Image (cartoon, helix red, strand yellow):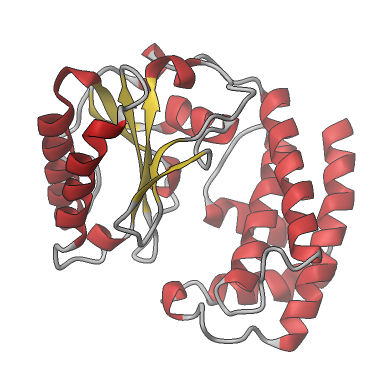
Amino acid sequence: MTLSQPTPDPQLNAILHQLVTSVREVLGERLVAAYLQGSFATGGWDRNSDVDFLFVVEEDLPETLLPRLQDVHVQIYEIESYWAKHLEGSYFPREWLKSPDPSCRPIVYIDNGSRELVRSAHDNTLVVRWVVRECGITLAGPPPTALIDPVSADDLRREVFNTMRDWGQEIRTHQYQINNRWAQPFAVISYCRMLHTLHTGRVDSKPAGVRWGLTNLDPRWAGLIQRAWNERPDQYLKVHLPADPGDLAQTLEFIEDALALGETLLDL
């Protein structure tokens, strides 16, 4: 069922309504459905969250349509609102979304804080399929269960562990830099959340992952985890500020410990 008030925030609801209406004007019958996912779907959103959406389209969008769709996102971005500048999501072809896509084909995507549509495999994951199917908030079209096959807990856990491993390697080799006050806490929170998924076979919110980490992980990480969560307010203003050296070093140790624990959880 489509909700006229999909979130508790009236300003965000107005922006989402404008987004869906404007996209429908461009895509017409190509538009199948629209959903909120991410923190608004899993229940962990706050005033520092981005707004994750997913549009389902009949087929991969032709390049000729993208300039008009680009104009929609520029117009939304220029609205005087935090939410308008923190929309993130994809235009997912119906058949690609239905079941896992081993080739991870890139789809039309806009990143948080960006005005520019690109092609990216960022959302072509089991995690996104699981969140949309199990928790997604319908903005237009049928319920997500009508369009997405169930994702097994084992498949979900395997993908999450692979993400933990691959991202850890990128951090270790400095391909992904965490030496700032946004990325370092983000890594700690994300690894808590991913470990939580390995434990439960579900995708839950960031706050739930942090609570689980504080309760279930080695107590020596409790201070690091709590400080990471305390850094969350105004997080996007902190990307140019250097991380605390002690927390940075401890985060690298935490990631190694999380990977070792992840292997154990995966084998349970």
Which residue is the extreme one toward the front? 64
User: Which of the 4 image quarters holds residue 85?
Assistant: bottom left
Indicate the quadrant containing the C terminus: top left, top right, bottom left or bottom right: top right
Image point 41% across, 53% down: which residue?
Answer: 111
* Image-based side of 26 in relation to 155, left or right: left
User: Which of the 4 image quarters holds residue 191?
Assistant: bottom right
Q: Pinpoint residue 185: horizontal percent, then vertical percent.
A: 61, 70
Image point 62% across, 25% down: which residue?
Answer: 103
Q: Pinpoint residue 220: horizontal percent, then vertical percent.
A: 83, 71
Q: Nearer the viewer, residue 25 or 214?
A: 25
Image point 73% across, 24% down: which residue?
Answer: 154
Q: Pinpoint residue 142: horizontal percent, then vertical percent.
A: 27, 17
Q: Is residue 75 visible?
A: yes
Indicate the quadrant containing the N terminus: top left, top right, bottom left or bottom right: top left
* Image-based side of 123 in relation to 162, left or right: left
Q: Nearer the viewer, residue 232 or 242?
A: 242
Q: Is residue 268 visible?
A: no
